[in-house]
Amino acid sequence: MGIGSFIKKQFIDVLQWNEDVDGVLSWRYPMQDFEIQNGGVLIVRESQMAVFVNEGQVADVFGAGTYKLTTQTLPLLTNLKNWDKLFASPFKSDVYFFSTRVQTGRKWGTPQPITIRDKDFDMIRVRAFGMYSYRVADPRLFFKEISGTRDVYTRDEVEDQLRGILMASMASSLGGANVPFLDMAANQALMAQQVKGDLATAFGRYGIGLDEFNVASVSLPEELQAALDERISAGMKGGMSADKMAGFTKYQVASAIPLAAQNEGGMAGIGAGLGAGLTVGQTIGQALGASLAPQPAAAAPAAAPVAAAAPAEDSIEARLEKLKGLLDKGLISAADYDGTKAELLKKLIG
């Protein structure tokens, strides 16, 4: 090599990255025809890492600090180059700087619903939105799997790839969970916790560390939400089996007894409301007559049952009024009202 050619060579004494542009995650030092001086200086700032790459193969990785470049500080590159322990000439190598700062406040969402399995609804489609933050944790893996040999690799570019990873991880983690969707929708922190673990593992395969992940909102598509609302409404209003309906009716009757007992007429009013008022009234009347009538008189015991068994017309009319009152208060059903009313009218008319 002539002296003129040697003079034209340009040497690099200091390698560093000032991060002048925000949002850049990977930046290749512009080598062109430059060569690195033996004994040159590498400066790696806090929240940065530097990687020496020889013909596409990752060699030495440096964290924050200042380094003098020799065969001792570049052992892997020295081995790849087959250098002697004391090389005297400048050398060429690609040098990449990586920003390891946490990228905060990054938005994620599901433009299209993702389909997941659910223990309550079998298969459902879910939309969700939230925030997450991440950083380059392993520049070696990040270079191999994502950024490659490009001069500049930005945050927007990596997030295009992360979006697909996020959607796949979410579908897998939610679909494999035993937690029903309704519980997750009611507790978004639970949903975020369910997804975060699997998502951190997926990000880690690409040299990316997941710092934070949260769910701001979760919803179903409109048509599924309408179907869910209808199902909930049916369950509340009348989506009951015959056995459950019968049990519910018994519960209503049992609940009505303490209220009706407070009305004028006491148990006789309850009996009228439930279609058994005459029987209850007669039984009570017979018991009272038997206990209060004088024992020596023969006619008195016979008269008491007759009086109790044949209520006056005014008594039946009063029961009809009480029966109507029970219906108006919702304490008996229309069917109970009609049946008892017919029975009382039949006895009234004769």
Image (cartoon, rainbow, N blue to C red):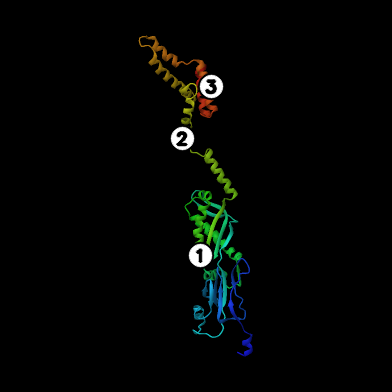
- Name the amino acid, label 1: Gly
Residue at image location 56% in from the left, 74% down from the top: 43
Determine the residue located farthest toward the bottom in the rendered image: 2
How far apart marks 1 and 2 lie (CA) works out to 56 Å
How far apart marks 2 and 3 lie (CA) works out to 28 Å
Q: Earlier in the sequence, mark 3 or mark 1?
A: 1
Quadrant in which residue 110 is drawn = bottom right
Tell me the SS state at disc 1: helix
Q: Mark 1 sits on what residue?
A: 204
- Name the amino acid, label 3: Glu
Tell me the SS state at disc 3: helix
Between tags 1 and 2, which lies in front?
A: 1
Q: Is residue 350 visible?
A: no
Q: Is residue 280 visible?
A: yes
Between tags 3 and 1, which lies in front?
A: 1
Residue 94 locus on image (x, y percent): 57, 77
Residue 185 locus on image (x, y percent): 53, 50
Residue 172 locus on image (x, y percent): 51, 58
Residues 36 and 279: in front is 36
Q: Mark 3 sits on what residue?
A: 321
Q: Mark 2 sits on what residue?
A: 247
